[in-house]
Image: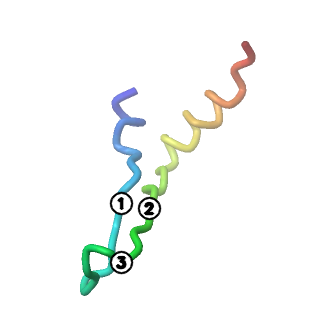
Amino acid sequence: MNELSTIVRNTCRRHDATCGDEIFEIDTTPNAKQAQALDLIQQIRL
């Protein structure tokens, strides 16, 4: 779980943007270990 806790979604705005300008989100890219863990989680059937 500690490994997965470093995957985050960042809310961003252009460097020269004003308060009313659009924002966008960028998710961090999982490393190999995180990707494997996410794949295993996807396989869990409830």
The one of 17 and 20 positioned closer to us in this rendering: 20
Tell me the residue that label 1 is attached to: 11
Extreme residue in the top direction:
46
The one of 28 and 11 positioned closer to us in this rendering: 11
Dots 3, 2 in contact, CB < 8 A = no
Q: Which amino acid does label 3 sit on?
A: Asp
Label 2's element? strand
Q: Which amino acid does label 1 sit on?
A: Thr
* Disc 2 packing (10 Å; few <14; some 14–19; many ≥20): few
Would you say 24 lies left or right of 18 here?
right
Instruction: Determine the CA span between mark 1 and mark 2.
Output: 4 Å
Tell me the residue that label 2 is attached to: 25
Would you say 14 lies left or right of 26 here?
left
Q: Quadrant of residue 20?
A: bottom left
* Quadrant (top left, top right, bottom left, bottom right) of the C terminus: top right
Extreme residue in the front direction:
20
Label 3's element? loop
Tell me the residue that label 3 is attached to: 21
* Quadrant (top left, top right, bottom left, bottom right) of the N terminus: top left
Would you say 31 lies left or right of 46 here?
left
Dots 1, 2 in contact, CB < 8 A = yes
Q: In this view, does 35 lie above or below 45?
A: below
Q: How many marks?
A: 3
Q: Residue at x 69, y 20 (%)?
A: 44
